[in-house]
Image: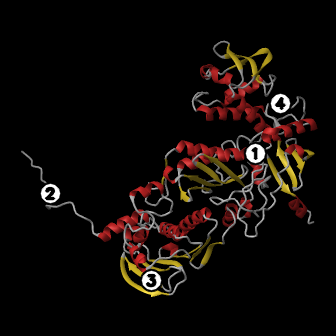
Amino acid sequence: MSSQVVRPIMSEHIVHILPEQVASQIAAGEVVERPASAVKELVENSLDAGARSVSVEILAGGSALIAVADDGSGMTRADAILSLRRHATSKIRSAADLTAIRTLGFRGEALASIASVSHLRMQTRRAADDNGVEVAAEAGNIEDTRTCAIAAGTRIEVRQLFFNTPARLKFLKTLATEQGAIAESFQRVALANHHIAFRLASDGRVVFDLPRANSVLERFRQVFGSKIATRMLAFDLDRPGIRAQGLAASSQESFPTGRMIFTFVNGRAVRDRMLIRAVEQAYQTLIPRGRHPATLLFVGMRPEDVDVNVHPMKTEVRFRNGGAVFDVVYHAIRDRLADQTDSVQPATIGDPPVSSTDDAAMGLITMSSKGAQDRVDDRAPSMRSDSPLRLVPDALTEKAFQRPLTLAYDRDARGGPAAPAAPIPMYSKLRVIGQIFAGYIALETEEGLLLIDQHAAHERVTFEKLRRELRDGGIRTQATLTPVSVELSPARAGMVHAAITEIRAMGFDVEPFGPTTLLLKGAPAVFGPEGGAKLLGDMIESMGDAGFRGGGEAAFENWLKQLACHGSVRVGRVLELPEIHSLLAELDRTEFKTNCPHGRPVHIQFARGQIERMFRR
């Protein structure tokens, strides 16, 4: 029995042009994903218009009302009407302009897209005009135009967003979620434009009221408060064609998520994985695994070297030379974190250097008791100081750590430079009170009491020595008086023998001595040969199933962390006063000295006022 394929009867024409209203709604879906997208587009238009003050009011998470008012340049009647048409823009003239975009907006879709899915009312006036103009539109169609009284600038009201696209309206999140998204979007724009006043109100409640700030640090303080602002370090690295500057949290401050990492390219807030990865890698070995820093990163470059036209909402960019950008960002932050004890005033992003009245810069960080509880318990059974604390003299000189105090002053309405804060004293310059619980060194500072975790401090010193030697060709080895045999587990012996080259690179002079034995002839010089066999055993025990192979430099750093941890002085070891002074001097000559390689704090501080309040003084 034969079968026939039944084909559907089709009309003669299956390709057609979408109606203008449907096309506008599709475009709106790309540009205006949610109320926060509309707020972002409208605020960016205000900034492009030269506004010095921007106010935003929302109701019901932005779905009922979004009102954005500014004191920018305003528009004529003809421009106001034309601005609501698709592809209308004042920011580019030809395709060639797309290669060097210098404004936040440029697509010419925002106002038309928003108007196509809402009831929109625009009031605008130029300073030179006697009256303003009001334009009312519904679903993209202009319903009315009239003159109005308004101060110079523009006010746009968007009501009942997505009223004619119920599918989009249905997928909006809860009221609180949409409000939060608007606040986060608004916050990013405010952080990038400290010289502009911003105000955000939600359902009659003021969320942000930010006056014009003198500096990026002051704006950061306005948004996030003084507690974290005082823990931010200014950084600035300028290389040909690329400049990375901003604020980075000290290594003793970290967060459970990456939401405190803000990245901007030529003043535009972006979500770029490469920039975030560069920031995160700059904090490697400085904060605990799984924690994230707070960073305000501004990357400046030639507009032709970055493509901002790769995403409808302009939140992603593409760099012409991403590797060079990564390198500048990484070193800008990493070099600043190398020594966090000096004081550097934050530069005014994008403005010429003038005077400053910012607060004193960063210093020793006051930590809560919770920070100290994150320490791994390294207690050793012995409370005696039988063997000396071995601290091999470092080839680095004091001069290498006497970094010049670079000052980039911020804008100050009163004029005149403010004196920079004095650098934080070095650990070795502080008065040693003694040792507490055979694990913590107590120091007296002008600000209060400083406690140093001796294991974390020695671990950082040791780790940096080992890493420097490894990069210089191999960790230096000191021979043992007599070879020592190290027995291996038969299950892991083959893996260990296969990693002989890597083990030697880490400072252990070993040779195979039978199928399950190694002959140890030398150990890393930084520890001395006495405990070499135990150190090697600990290293082999911590070796994963993949052995010592694979992972590159990052894998070696993880093994060096283990080596530094096992070989450093433990909590529970009583130190003599000369040993304490020696450790503090070594710590002062070490980069990244405020945290151990696993990210735990080396010190915590109890402010003098805090102590006095406990005694009710």
Residue 131 in percent (x, y) is at 49, 86
In the visual, does 604 lie left or right of 197? right
Q: Residues within 10 Å of mark 3 (few under 14, many from 20)?
A: many
Name which residue type carries label 2.
Answer: Pro
- Name which residue lies at 91% across and 66% down: 616
Q: Is 501 drawn above or below residue 212 in the view shown?
A: above
Query: Would you name the residue on which mark 2 appears?
Result: 8
Label 3, on which residue? 134
Q: CA distance from mark 3 to mark 1?
A: 57 Å
User: Would residue 455 be seen by someone viewing this image from the given angle?
Assistant: no
- Image coordinates of residue 88 in percent, x first then y, are 39, 68
Earlier residue among tags 1 and 4: 1
Residue at image mark 1: 339
Answer above or below: position of 464 versus 145. above
The answer to which of 362 and 463 lies nearer the viewer is: 362
Say whether residue 204 is visible. yes
Q: Write down the quadrant of residue 30 in the picture.
A: bottom left
